[in-house]
Image (cartoon, helix red, strand yellow):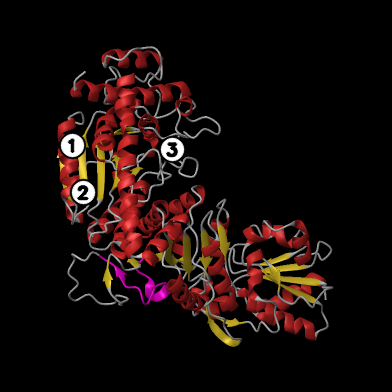
Amino acid sequence: MNQRELDQLSINTIRFLAVDAVQKANSGHPGMPLDAAPMAYVLWTRYLKHNPADPQWIDRDRFVLSAGHGSALLYALLHLTGYEEMTLEQLERFRQWQSLTPGHPESHMAGCVEASTGPLGQGIGNAVGMAIAEAHLAARYNRPGHELFDHHTYALAGDGDMMEGVQAEAASLAGHLRLGKLIILYDSNRVTLSGTTSLAFTEDVAARYRAYGWHVQRIDDGNDLAAISRALQAARETKDQPSLIVVQTVIGFGSPDKAGTFDAHGSPLGVDEVKKTKANLGWPEEPTFLIPEPALRHLRSAIERGNTAEDGWKRRFAEYAKQFPELAREIERRFRRELPASWASNLPEFPADAKGMATRKASEVVLQALARTVPELVGGSGDLDPSTYTWLKEDGDFESPLRPREGVQGTVGGGWGYAGRNIHFGVREHAMGAAVNGLVYHGGFIPFGATFLVFSDYMRAAIRLSAIAQLHGIWVFTHDSIAVGEDGPTHEAVEQVLALRAIPGMVVLRPGDANETRCAWQVAIERKTGPTALIFTRQHVPTLDRRVYAPADGLRRGAYVLNPEQTQPELILIGTGSEVSLIAGAERVLRERGMRVRLVSMPSWELFANEAAEYRQSVLPAEVTARLAVEAGRSIGWERWVGPTGDILSVDRFGASAPGDVVMKEYGFSVDNVVARALALLAW
């Protein structure tokens, strides 16, 4: 068998493993695996640096299937190249209960899957985040003669990806940053689920990407292996631009009746059409899941190549460790996901202050201290650093060293280049969300993305995916309520905290003062499985006197009693965020009237719900049924904590434009109104 015959045999093996998996499940997307198998084969056998024997090798190339509906293609590649957990049985159980081969790739289920993709465009944003990660690590750790970080990020995308807005934002950012080790293969088969792209998508994608600053190539025949190889080589040699390779393909290639039609996109070919397709491409009808030995031997050579490549890297790392032992230990620690010793020892304690500070400002102080001890903490905002206070003042901007910066104003300063830790995402919340996830997928980072709470809606798909994939990322949201004031209802968050709480696996923390803010950041840094949303105020809130009130680290348990000396309460006031100081003020008034009031700060429903029943009972005794929850957001869900006879002071309509303190008062958030609602509960 000559090389051309072996290539074709291997490509058809990939194709029909995918087709048989879809057909057996009677569910899935066979069209993309049939048309994209040649480009994936060339990439995986000639260019992709990976080691199936060690899926987590630090310096491997990353491969993201942005068009996640083509997951059967990825699973076939993983099995054929020798990833141990991706067995043939897993392919035979495609889309079945508790298999490692779900309908769209899930990274938390299989270690050999780089990213959870499927919502179109997100994978491109993830790939941009991975490329940022590689560039930053190379700039921070590589030394002359010691190139520890030198890998590419590849993504395979389809027409649907190219329509999504998140893709446009991410591509624009990547072009600006000149991420030369990012390469996207665009499977342009001009068909989507409901028809041909001519129905809704006729733009010149290549021209758009050139305008973004990308290196763009076009291949007219998706089966031309030599052309695909030349294009990949040219992309790898382009150091100062990300690369897009537009590959013209025919969806469902080889299917006599469905090739080139939307019928091949999202449904099995059908038993008869599978037979026809196999006959058309010279493939045996039986057995299904056929893997010819020559193809398997050829594709499994990836293990030997991967071992050789990783062994060479390990030798280089050993030499690096001799010359730069502290940096080597730091690299190993980061990729083990271990925090530095004494990382939290210098976090600030905030003194009691009636005026206090905005929790966004307290967050800034904490963040600077964290940046000095946790080098993997990297992030940025959607062009809102002066408002979210999330810049790392001593750590410079993440920017291409090739891009002139004459006349640039407003940068955070302190050096720049790919070693900078402040990522300027621009007004691109969609891309920021996806790229932050990509940084986590890559490994070696605890990234954060920041914006106003109301704009978390723009990022919701990425936030939801971070929870599905159990990613250790941090979402920082400021300007948390109607107290935003003059900007009005478009910028005043009302339903967003509730919406974030609704995401399974998400921990939402709305700290009540500066010291709770410190503790909230500690929880977010320590929490390794799943994302954390930190919700901060724009306005000043008092810093509670912890000599009078319980220590702020009660936040770790989600809710805690602020005045534990009150052991026999007749009323419980519950507050979060800026409303904690409000209930504290009301308690003082009620105490003067002879009432026994317990104060409960509840910054996190999720953490409190995970506590033992005994602890929850100690905070919210069942026998105390008079309860008032105070939060400047939607009331939905608070019934769980106040019970059927409790009350909720909340915001169940949109905000208004006026000074923030005026809006809060008009909406009932005043000590006088809290007192009145409390008295009504007890019918005083």
- 252 or 155, which is in the foreground? 155
The residue mark sitting in front, 1 or 2, is 1
- 13 or 259, which is in the foreground? 13
Residue ID at (30%, 23%): 295
- 209 or 523, which is in the foreground? 523
| Dominant SS type (magenta) | loop
Between the C-alphas of marks 3 and 2, the distance is 25 Å
Q: Is label 2 in a helix, a strand or a loop?
A: strand
Q: Are marks 3 and 2 in contact (CB under 8 Å)?
A: no
Q: Position of residue 616 (x, y in %)?
A: 74, 61
* Quadrant (top left, top right, bottom left, bottom right) of the N terminus: top left
Q: What is the quadrant of residue 293 in the picture?
A: top left
Which badge, 3 or 2, comes first in the chain's sequence?
Answer: 3
Q: Is label 1 in a helix, a strand or a loop?
A: helix
Residue ID at (40%, 32%): 75
- Amino acid identity at mark 3: His
Q: Position of residue 109 (x, y in %)?
A: 50, 41
Q: Are marks 1 and 3 in contact (CB under 8 Å)?
A: no
The image shows residue 285, relative to residue 338, as above or below, that is above
Which badge, 1 or 3, comes first in the chain's sequence?
Answer: 3
- Amino acid identity at mark 2: Ser
Task: Reply yes or no: does residue 262 show up in magenta.
Answer: no
Between the C-alphas of marks 1 and 2, the distance is 14 Å
**Can you identify the residue that label 2 sits on?**
243
- Amino acid identity at mark 1: Ser
Between the C-alphas of marks 1 and 3, the distance is 27 Å
**Can you identify the residue that label 1 sits on?**
229
Residue ID at (26%, 63%): 143
**Can you identify the residue that label 3 sits on?**
104
Q: Crowding at label 3, few (<14), some or many (≥20) Cα neighbours within 10 Å?
A: many
Q: Position of residue 183 (x, y in %)?
A: 25, 47
Q: Which residues are magenta?
A: 382-399
